[in-house]
Amino acid sequence: MKAVRIHEYGGPEVLVCDEVERPAPGPQQALIRVEAAGVNPVDVAVREDRFPTPKAPPKTIGSDGAGVVVEVGPDVAGLAVGDEVFFSGLGIGSEGSYAEYAVIAAVQAVPKPPSASFVEAAALGLAFATAHYGLVHRAQLQPDETVLVQGAAGGVGSAAVQLARVLGGRVFGTVSADDDAIRVRELGAEATIDRKREDVAARARELTGGNGVDIVVELHTSANLDTDLAAIARGGRIVCIGQGPRPEAEVPIGRALAADASLLFTSSGNAGRAGVADILREVSQLVEEGRLRPVVGRTFPLAEARAAHEALAGRHYGKIVLVP
């Protein structure tokens, strides 16, 4: 089978499409014919060795996917050959999803929403699990609270906009282009803020009658923390999902104290495999009800994973997906 692997750490150029042996499932595992694989920032972090993993190169990367069960190992219940599923959580302690076949733990398999294509299902995994874990489990979003999503046009951002709206929040999102502003408002944002042309904190306060927002969903913590603290209401929460351009962030202590601010660092992986699967089952139901929708910006053939990673590094809308 074909699989995209890294033999060394580095830039997108280290991604190589290799011919490798098809794996076999062990106990409590299933073999999936991958029909689509999501491309995520964590895949880049693994590629660059900014997210240390137990397995050294050469290794297949990729965390998300959707496909068809073709074989099940011993002691697997509730999963059968032919089932259409999607999953998240590969590529850290296991081989990843950038491949024609992938082995997953049976507990990771979630039934694919019948109304979604495989490409759309692959776009749900990590993005919606991350947004849900941050908003629900960490920030404990309540109805009528205000939420500012930084980077609202990206994969996690577009998921967070939709989830916050479904959970009863008033949602605002930052964007960097007019076409993204239109798209983000279509996803449910009440208003958008152009981070290139507007003062984000001042505009957020204007939109909330001078109070500031209750929650900020932050994907670039090291770049935006000062702005976030200026934008939140007293007692506000900043959900720190992504690192940003630097591995450290400076905290303006006085501003944080004055706001009674909470900095909530979060990783959906802490929910565990079963916990992430439970979140994705809830997401799947909301998709079937028409209350959420996967947002696919671009697709690339599996062999063009390098181009997909290069696109991820630039301005993009929604999720980027590989198709074997």
Image (cartoon, helix red, strand yellow):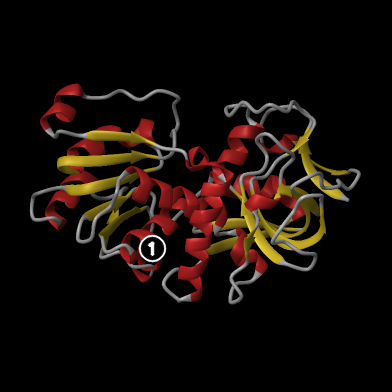
The residue that disc 1 covers is: 162
- Residue 296 position in % (x across, y down): 56, 63
Residue at 30% x, 45% y is 139
Specify the amino acid type for callout 1: Gln
Residue at 62% x, 26% y is 52
Left or right of 307 in this view: 274: left
Residue at 15% x, 29% y is 255
Q: Residue furthest left?
A: 210
Residue at 35% x, 63% y is 181
Q: Nearer the viewer, residue 12 or 61?
A: 61
- Residue 212 position in % (x across, y down): 15, 47
Q: Quadrant of residue 299?
A: bottom right
Q: Quadrant of the C terminus?
A: bottom right
- Residue 133 position in % (x across, y down): 42, 48
Is residue 98 among what the camera can see? no
Q: Nearer the viewer, residue 187 or 86?
A: 86
Total numbered labels placed on residues in the image: 1
Q: Secondary structure at mark 1?
A: helix
In the depicted structure, whether residue 322 falls above or below residue 14: below
Left or right of 183 in this view: 31: right
In the depicted structure, whether residue 194 falls above or below residue 285: above
- Residue 198 position in % (x across, y down): 24, 50
**Mark 1 Cα-neighbour bin, 10 Å: few <14, some 14–19, many ≥20:** many
